[in-house]
Image: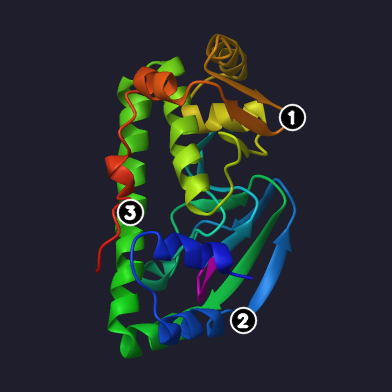
Amino acid sequence: MIERHLMKLRARDEINDEEEAAIRGSVAEIRRIAADQVVVRALQPMDFSTILLSGIAGRAKDLADGKRQITELHTPGDYTDLHSFTLKYLDHDVLALSDCEFAVVPHEKLREITQRLPHLTRVYWFATNLDAAVHREWEVCLGRRSAVERMAHLFCELHVRMGLVGLVEDDGYELSLTQSQLAECLGLTQVHVNRTLMELRNGLLEFSRGRVRIRNLAALRALAGFDPAYLYLDRRPR
């Protein structure tokens, strides 16, 4: 049920049997959410957090003119809103961008983990710090990288994150996003997204029918200026 969540944690640290049992025991229910539905609404009081089990989710903020900015994507294995444990509500929505499954973890279970398992608590603290690092990199992309660079960077990031949980095959991965959703991630118009995808098809990658196929990973990373250091991929005790 939560194997990809455990894979993600173990990619960066040890998780012992007691900690695994606590993680499994923390799940109260599984929720299936259809694409384009709000999972958690901004300013809603929160007494639970959610782990994405399958599909693609995102954090998003709506503007008064109806435009939307997706501020981060979540891949299977991610806590989408662990920070709500301390904040108690979110300043943004969590959206199911494709059909998704979520594990619901009551905050009372997280409180028990913090009181009983200090190492696992630090692992989850690291996870919220990692989210902040991803947000900073997205801010750099939106503010300083060109359209083709930021799109290449996003595909490189997802290649790493999908790979951590066994979802990359033959340098490709499933990505059930529309061009409109990509535009909301990248701060572009849908027309500009289409034009940029055509530019990347020139020997670097293809994105069609919900699948990314990377033809030249080294060249794609060079174009994006992609350095995975912000994803903290080294495995070390926390």
Question: Crowdedness of circle 1 by 10 Å Cα count: few (<14), some, many (20+)?
Answer: few
* The N terminus, quarter of image: bottom right
Per the image, the residue denoted by label 2 is 28
Q: Look at the image and say whether residue 65 sits in the magenta stretch.
A: no
Between 26 and 208, the residue placed more toward the observer is 208
The residue under the point 45% across, 42% down is 160
User: Is residue 51 found left or right of 121 in the rendered image?
Assistant: right
Query: CA–CA distance between discs 2 and 1?
Result: 34 Å
**Magenta stretch containing residue 48, yes or no?**
yes
Q: Residue at x 29, y 43 (%)?
A: 230
Hey, what amino acid is under mark 3? Leu
Nearer to the camera, 131 or 19: 19
Q: Earlier in the sequence, mark 2 or mark 1?
A: 2
- Mark 1: which amino acid? Arg
* Residue underneath mark 1: 209
Residue 17 vertical placement versus 189 (above, below): below
**Picture coordinates of residue 154 (x, y %)?**
46, 32
- Where is residue 59? Give x, y as percent: 50, 48
Label 3, on which residue?
130
- Which of the 4 quarters of the picture holds residue 219? top left
What quarter of the picture does the C terminus occupy?
bottom left
Mark 1, secondary structure of its residue: loop
Label 3's element?
A: helix
Q: Is residue 149 above or below residue 202?
A: below
Q: Magenta stretch: give its range.
A: 45-50
Q: Viewer-proximal residue, 142 or 42?
A: 142
Residue drawn at x 33%, y 54% is: 130
Location of residue 237 in the rendering, given as x and y in whole percent from the top left corner: 25, 68
**234 is higher (above) or lower (below) than 202:** below
Per the model, the C-alpha gap separating discs 1 and 3 is 30 Å
